[in-house]
Image: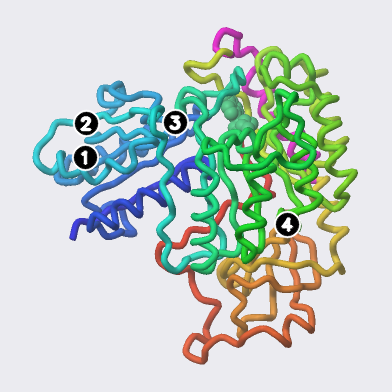
């Protein structure tokens, strides 16, 4: 049987696309190889949101191309956003690539590999499915992880001036609500407890089959209104077995009263929203074409937190956008404190092809960008640290996702606010996929340590005797979900 290996770069959407590639390849008779050097087909699923990610890909292609000189039978596939962005040009930029595959062309992968096997020259397939959008469904018969992603829309109609995504992922296309509900129901009956709805601007969702009733609080005259709240309500009503529902990434414009109302009423919705703000300066927000002001952002999250005071917010921020002065950056720092973000991804502005901001001079020196990023992380670490410290001694409900970091903790999972929790002293118990009550014993830099509450310990199942050296190592094919509350970026 032919063997394949997939390496994934970038966002959750790419992680999800890679899962679908695993599925189409397995169904076509391929088996996974842990080591790309043993694989007949190597897929690099790429990201182009920042230049660094794109460079990483090109150096990986270079490494594999070198390997290929002595192993000419290996087929090298470049998929994802760099594939969509560069198309044919990739074949001239890098030697050794056999197939360039856009994100909308995943179902065609096995057929294209067959063509290459029959001696076809290097192929490029990067066509958006605009007329009949396809959303690939997870085929997990028995879920390998308690958490899963479900795509509800793809593409982006915003025109944020820094962002290449509208170019690499095309215009917005939405998936019918019945299909979304059916996929979630299938995952839940296979053992999934938590679903994260995915979309580039996930809360601009509209049901193409017009099946959703208007959600409470929805105002049809509001241009920012969408049917996202109505979709959340349908999922909650029709998949009662789902324990937790998250979504990423929303656009602040669509955090409308109907969505706030849904958060208040639906207990399945996690008490965490990742809401990219990008900057705290109105001047920069305008240049970024974000279509909200700082005051509007603060007002929207303010009305959400006023109704749900224990809700956690995290965000994305770009430092060193063209024209960003020290005063603009100071406004960003003050916004981070004002909102009290508990997680933050910070990025140095990186000029991208095909973006409106290309017309602006990339005029903040690299050293200045690095310095601002370090100052930003200092503030966000301080906020997260203080928040985690406040939780010591409290009781929390944790969805246990799997084994903790090697050797150090037994199990790890997340609270509904998305704090990462390592549960110690439960090595002999089978907690995987369960929601357990824990008592927080310690705050680490980015996570919490906890012990099971007495009640949770009394009702937990022991591990089967044969696997007493557990917790189980990660099952083959299982991929850990990305921690959303984390410091990172660069
Ligand atoms: N430069 C730096 N960061 C960017 N992002 C998107 N485009 C760029 C860019 N050109 C960041 C934004 C976005 C996150 C996914 O990546 O913060 O929310």
Circle 2 crowding by C-alpha within 10 Å: few under 14, some 14–19, many from 20? some
Seen from the viewer's position, the closer of residues 128 and 146 is 128
- Ligand 1 image-quadrant field: top right
Q: Is residue 292 above or below residue 52?
A: above
The secondary structure type at the circle numbered 4 is loop
Magenta stretch: includes residue 362: yes
Magenta stretch: includes residue 16: no
Of mark 4 and mark 1, the one earlier in the sequence is 1
- The residue shown at (88%, 46%) is 307
- The residue shown at (60%, 23%) is 158
Of mark 3 and mark 1, the one earlier in the sequence is 3
Label 4 and label 3: CA atoms lie apart by 30 Å
Q: Residue 66, percent across and down?
A: 24, 39
Q: Which residue is mark 4?
A: 419
| Foreground: disc 3 or disc 1 | 1
Label 2 and label 1: CA atoms lie apart by 8 Å
- The residue shown at (60%, 9%) is 361
The numbered mark at residue 112 is 1
Label 4 and label 1: CA atoms lie apart by 42 Å
Q: Is mark 4 within 8 Å of ligand 1?
A: no
The secondary structure type at the circle numbered 3 is helix
Q: Which residue is mark 3?
A: 54
Q: Which residue is mark 2?
A: 123
């Amino acid at each position: 049987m032919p063997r394949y290996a997939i390496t994934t770069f970038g966002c959750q959407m790419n992680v999800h696309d890679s899962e679908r590639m695993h599925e189409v390849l397995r169904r076509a008779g391929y088996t996974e190889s842990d080591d790309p050097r043993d694989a007949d087909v190597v897929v690099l699923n790429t990201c182009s949101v920042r230049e660094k990610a794109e460079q990483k890909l090109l150096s990986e292609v270079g490494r594999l191309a070198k390997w290929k000189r002595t192993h000419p039978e290996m087929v090298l596939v470049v998929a994802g956003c760099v594939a969509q962005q560069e198309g044919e040009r990739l074949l001239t930029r890098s030697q050794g690539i056999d197939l360039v595959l856009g994100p909308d062309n995943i179902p065609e992968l096995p057929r294209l590999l067959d063509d290459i096997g029959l001696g076809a020259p290097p192929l490029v397939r990067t066509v958006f499915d605009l007329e009949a959008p396809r959303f690939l469904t997870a085929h997990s018969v028995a879920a390998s992880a308690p958490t899963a992603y479900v795509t509800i829309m793809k593409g982006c109609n915003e025109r944020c001036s820094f962002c290449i995504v509208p170019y690499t992922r095309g215009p917005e296309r939405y998936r019918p609500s019945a299909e979304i509900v059916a996929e979630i129901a299938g995952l839940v009956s296979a053992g999934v407890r938590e679903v994260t709805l995915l979309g580039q601007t996930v809360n601009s969702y509209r049901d193409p089959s017009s099946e959703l009733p208007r959600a409470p609080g929805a105002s049809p005259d509001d241009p920012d209104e969408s049917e996202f709240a109505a979709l959340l309500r349908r999922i909650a009503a029709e998949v009662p077995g789902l324990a937790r529902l998250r979504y990423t990434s929303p656009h602040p414009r669509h955090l409308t009263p109907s969505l706030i109302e849904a958060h208040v009423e639906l207990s399945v919705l996690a008490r965490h929203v990742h809401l990219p703000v990008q900057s705290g300066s109105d001047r920069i927000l305008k240049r970024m074409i974000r279509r909200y002001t700082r005051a509007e952002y603060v007002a929207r999250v303010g009305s959400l937190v006023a109704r749900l005071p224990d809700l956690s917010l995290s965000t994305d921020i770009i430092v060193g956008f063209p024209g960003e002065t020290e005063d603009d950056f100071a406004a960003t720092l003050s916004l981070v404190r004002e909102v009290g973000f508990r997680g933050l991804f910070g990025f140095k502005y990186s000029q991208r092809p095909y973006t409106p901001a290309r017309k602006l001079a990339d005029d903040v020196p690299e050293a200045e960008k690095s310095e601002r990023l370090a100052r930003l992380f200092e503030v966000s670490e301080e906020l997260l640290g203080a928040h985690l410290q406040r939780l010591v001694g409290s009781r929390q409900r944790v969805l246990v996702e799997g084994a903790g970091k090697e050797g150090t903790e037994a199990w790890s999972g997340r609270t509904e606010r998305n704090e990462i929790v390592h549960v110690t002293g439960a090595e002999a118990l089978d907690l995987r996929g369960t929601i357990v009550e824990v008592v927080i014993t310690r705050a680490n830099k980015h996570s919490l340590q906890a012990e099971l509450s007495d009640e949770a310990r009394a009702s937990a199942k022991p591990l089967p005797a044969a696997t007493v050296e557990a917790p189980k190592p990660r099952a083959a094919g299982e991929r850990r979900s990305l921690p959303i509350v984390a410091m990172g970026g660069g």
